[in-house]
Image: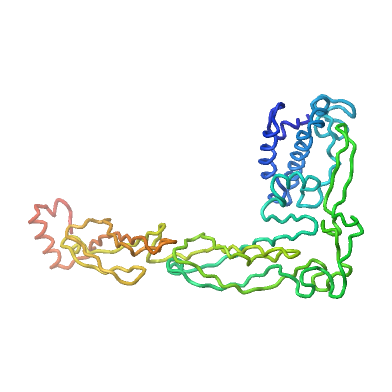
Amino acid sequence: MAQDLYEILGVKKGATDAELKAAYRKLALKWHPDKHKGDADAEKKFKEINVAYEVLSDQKKRQQYDTFGSTGGPGGSPGGGGAGFGGFDFNGFDFAGGGGAGGFADIFESFFGGGAGGGGQKRRKGGAMRGNDIEAGIQIGFKEAVFGCEKELEITKPDVCKNCKGNGAEPGSSIVTCKTCNGSGEIRSVRNTILGQMTNSHACSECNGEGKVPEKKCSVCHGTTRVRSKERVKVKIPGGVDNGSTIRLSGKGEAGVKGGPHGDLYINLAVESSKDFFRHGTEIHSEAHLHVIQAVLGSEIEVNTLDGKSKIKIPGGTEDGKVFKLSGKGVPIMGTDKRGDHLVKVKLDVPKKLSKKEKELYGELAENAGIDIKKSGLFG
């Protein structure tokens, strides 16, 4: 059964222009092939969305569709003869180029300002194109993440060809008008349908929509204007970053085309764990072991912190699991000169083996406390 164009956009038959635009914008972003590379179903869905909007956004075509499109009319019956939507044949639209956007690139660009999906790589004839963003990963130590550090990594990326200086032509040769599109940068075709003539256009594959081509292609980059190269990049990592944090280095991504700016480099951080500390946001957590006598009588102990040793006073009668706070001994709070806290949880160590003398002493304590050792089974 043929699907209705209104159903494709998820709107009612009486939808206003504003409702059509809103529906198209949402669906076009969701199903653009750049977000579903290699997915034929997504490309087909994107095609259907664009066909539906091209028809319904044109008052004349919409009126014709409302009259004939759903019930069959001149030119075929619903679903027949290759018609995709109630007799409407849109199989002739060419979606080559533009990441699958094809002849509907102009519709998409009118909403999103040129380029669709991820990198803003679409460019108009003769215009510059920004380079793609790239990602890399770095592993850093626990304390390096806390206090900051500087790292260096090597990345491989497309860079401007030094031989042709980015114009794609062999030095000494010229840039000439493309003979395939006669300099227009586009290949257009017209198809007659029951809704009238439908014009389809796509970027010229010979000049990639530029309208100009090298008279003789560069012998190094073969006319692509870029070559892959390696670069060592220094990264300053601020104190306070966490596992999974991302640092952006502006202009360190892929080189642009036709003088366009470089993309950015995004560095994803993987922070090693620590055997002494556990981190929660800007807090540092650790454990300190106490002998039961220390907990009962009180004492002063040393604990490891990010800054070295620190002392904690343990009051008499401290229970297992009590938490002590070391203010300002945690992780730096990014954007400020303050730090979080270090929380130390005490864990009581109950002796498992006692000497004869120790048993006697504990026995005396039990007797003074009115505890029947034999009945309770203590030290039994």
Residue drawn at x 75%, y 30% is 4
The N terminus appears in which quarter of the rendering? top right
Residue drawn at x 30%, y 71% is 309
- Judged left or right of residue 316, residue 188 is right
Would you place residue 91 above or below residue 338 in this image?
A: above
Query: Percent from the top left, x then y, of residue 299?
Result: 19, 66
- Judged left or right of residue 1, residue 251 is left
The C terminus appears in which quarter of the rendering? bottom left
Report which quarter residue 172 is drawn in: bottom right
Query: Percent from the top left, x then y, of residue 233?
Result: 59, 72
Q: Work out whether residue 110 or residue 313 is closer to the camera in this orientation and state it.
A: 110
Q: Work out whether residue 345 or residue 308 is closer to the camera in this orientation and state it.
A: 308
The structure's colour scheme is rainbow
How many circles with numbers are drawn on the protein? 0
Query: Percent from the top left, x then y, of residue 65?
Result: 81, 29
Would you place residue 76 above or below residue 319 in this image?
A: above
